[in-house]
Amino acid sequence: MKIAAANIKLDEIIGKVEKKGLKAPKLIDDLKELREYALKEQDPLVTKVLRLTYEYIGEKDGFDVQAQYEEDEEGNEYPIEIDAKENLLYILNLLKNADHKINREEIKDYRTALKLELY
């Protein structure tokens, strides 16, 4: 994220999730507030992923989205087993540097996975 206040908010959310997990107080409200910064930054990918993230957490009471895969020698992809807290922390940390090419690709993977799960 580019706006300094957005990065402060993102760090605050990450800290809450590290301590309390998905039961962190006001997590969904915090994500909604962070989304407002993404709107100001005019980053549609981050804006959408944040919305889908808090909708998913609200509906499923967790974050077991399967968006990370590893590849074997033959090129076959297998989902990486990751708990909900670590999964959410991973996407939040990707958002810290959302303009980085590789991070952007992974954020797109989350967007696709979240859409499939929610709709």
Image: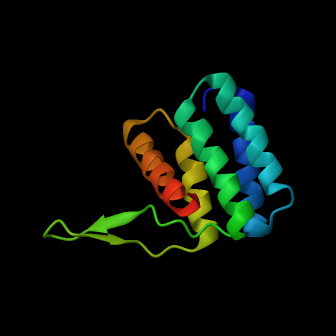
* Residue 73 quadrant: bottom left
- Which quadrant does the N terminus fall into? top right
Q: Residue at x 64, y 68 (%)?
A: 85
Task: Tell me how many marks there are.
Answer: 0
- From this view, report whether residue 56 is shown above or below residue 46: below
Horizontal and vertical percent position of residue 92: 61, 50
Horizontal and vertical percent position of residue 116: 49, 59
Direction from residue 38 to residue 114 in the image, left or right = left
Q: Is residue 93 visible in the rendered structure shown here? A: yes
Foreground pick, 13 / 54: 54
Toward the front, the furthest residue is: 119
Toward the right, the furthest residue is: 25
Direction from residue 3 to residue 45 in the image, left or right = left
Q: Residue at x 70, y 62 (%)?
A: 57
Direction from residue 26 to residue 55 in the image, left or right = left
Direction from residue 29 to residue 100 in the image, left or right = left
Toward the left, the furthest residue is: 74
Q: Residue at x 43, y 36 (%)?
A: 100
Q: Is residue 18 visible in the rendered structure shown here? A: no
- Which quadrant does the C terminus fall into? bottom right
Foreground pick, 32 / 80: 32
Colour convention: rainbow
Q: Residue at x 79, y 56 (%)?
A: 27
- From this view, report whether residue 88 is shown above or below residue 79: above
